[in-house]
Amino acid sequence: MTDRETKLLERWRAERPMYAAWGNFVSATLTDAVAKEIRPAAVELFLRIPIRPRTKEEASLLAKAFRRGKPYTDPYNDIEDKVGLRFVVLVSADIKVVERAITTCPKWTAMLARDYEEERRQRPYEFDYQSVHYIVRSKDELTFEGVTIAAGTPCEIQVRTILQHAYSELTHDTIYKPSVQASPDVKRSAAKSMALMEATDDYFMRVREWLDAALAPSREVSAAVDRLYRSFTGLEPQPSPLDTLLIDHFGQWAKEGFEGDLKQFLNEKAFLADRIKERAPADLLFRQPAVLMVYWAIKVAPRSAPENGPLTDEELAPIYSDLGLARPAAQG
């Protein structure tokens, strides 16, 4: 090992914990920002693979610094992906959501290092590797996980669709090797798969647009009860698949002006906030924003609302009791 390699590794071993903490900070900050933007949808469903910030292995760092013919004047500082993380989403439109979170965060500066859309505009007849890459650098010194992070510390963020991710995983460190590039069949097959991937993303987007239109009323109800649940109870909701089931069934009693009507109803029944808070720790139903929709539907249609619904008589009992109503079964 040469002296310059030894010096680079010594510095890396000393600073690697700082880079790991910076990666964790960026990951946590972006995940929270994305979650707020897509609420009430769950961020765990929006992001298709878990985010795991990764610091470069020593061998990989040495190879990039000294063995790949990179024109670095200061290899250690010029390498901007010593820590990196990857956001994988479903379709290309979702990339914009993550980009907004990246570019609006006040904790760092963000530089677009690679833009696949711009590359497609410049080379419209080529089908090649696609991904959006950003380099973010901390604006100020900060402390995270007990580690001090220096101002200007870089982190690479890749944002791609799940199809782009699959292509990258298949061809990573392979398709671009000289020995492989020499094969026209391999290059053509790779280009065809990329073209098919783009076409598939286009079809996915059309399906998404159709589904969004069909689901718009339910999503409006979901967003409304999410807002009101937070303001009415002061609790942070924990939406689960149950929330969707409740909206799908009880949402049919949400007519035009529903949010205003529900807000007035809750103002008149302010005691319900305490009932929900009392039960929420032990009962999933009362941690769902749509529990407000259940109260409303039973108030509007006490007999018909629960019919063929997702809740049992036992689960509905406290809601009827809170409203001073007898359950339909008990009414005979």
Image (spheres, rainbow, N blue to C red):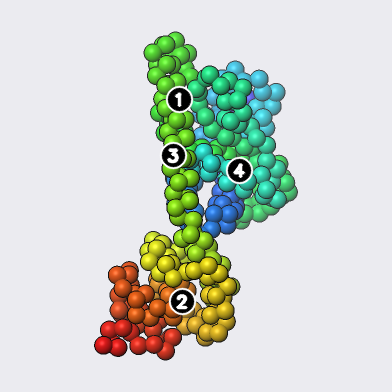
- Alpha-carbon span between mark 4 and mark 3: 20 Å
Q: Which residue is mark 2?
A: 296
Q: Residue 120: image x %, image y %?
A: 57, 25
Q: Residue at x 72, y 46 (%)?
A: 139
- Label 1's element? helix
Q: Residues within 10 Å of mark 4 (few under 14, many from 20)?
A: some
Q: Residue 11: image x %, image y %?
A: 63, 36
- Label 4's element? helix
Asked whether residue 4 appears in the rendered view, the answer is yes
240 versus 197 height, above or below: below
What's the mark number on residue 195?
1
The type of residue carrying mark 2 is: Trp
Q: Residues within 10 Å of mark 2 (few under 14, many from 20)?
A: many
- Label 2's element? helix
Label 4 or label 2, whichever lies nearer to me, is 2
The image quarter containing residue 111 is: top right
**Quadrant placement of the C terminus:** bottom left
Q: Residue 40: image x %, image y %?
A: 51, 60
Q: Mark 4 or mark 1, which is nearer the start of the sequence? A: 4
What's the mark number on residue 204?
3
Q: Residue at x 65, y 27 (%)?
A: 75
In-image side of 35 versus 203 (left or right): right
In-image side of 299 versus 152 (left or right): left
In-image side of 31 versus 74 (left or right): left
Q: Mark 2 or mark 1, which is nearer the start of the sequence? A: 1
Q: Which residue is mark 4?
A: 99
Q: Mark 3 or mark 4, which is nearer the start of the sequence? A: 4
Q: Mark 1 or mark 3, which is nearer the start of the sequence? A: 1
Label 1 or label 2, whichever lies nearer to me, is 2
Q: Residue at x 43, y 42 (%)?
A: 207
- Label 3's element? helix
- Alpha-carbon span between mark 1 and mark 2: 50 Å
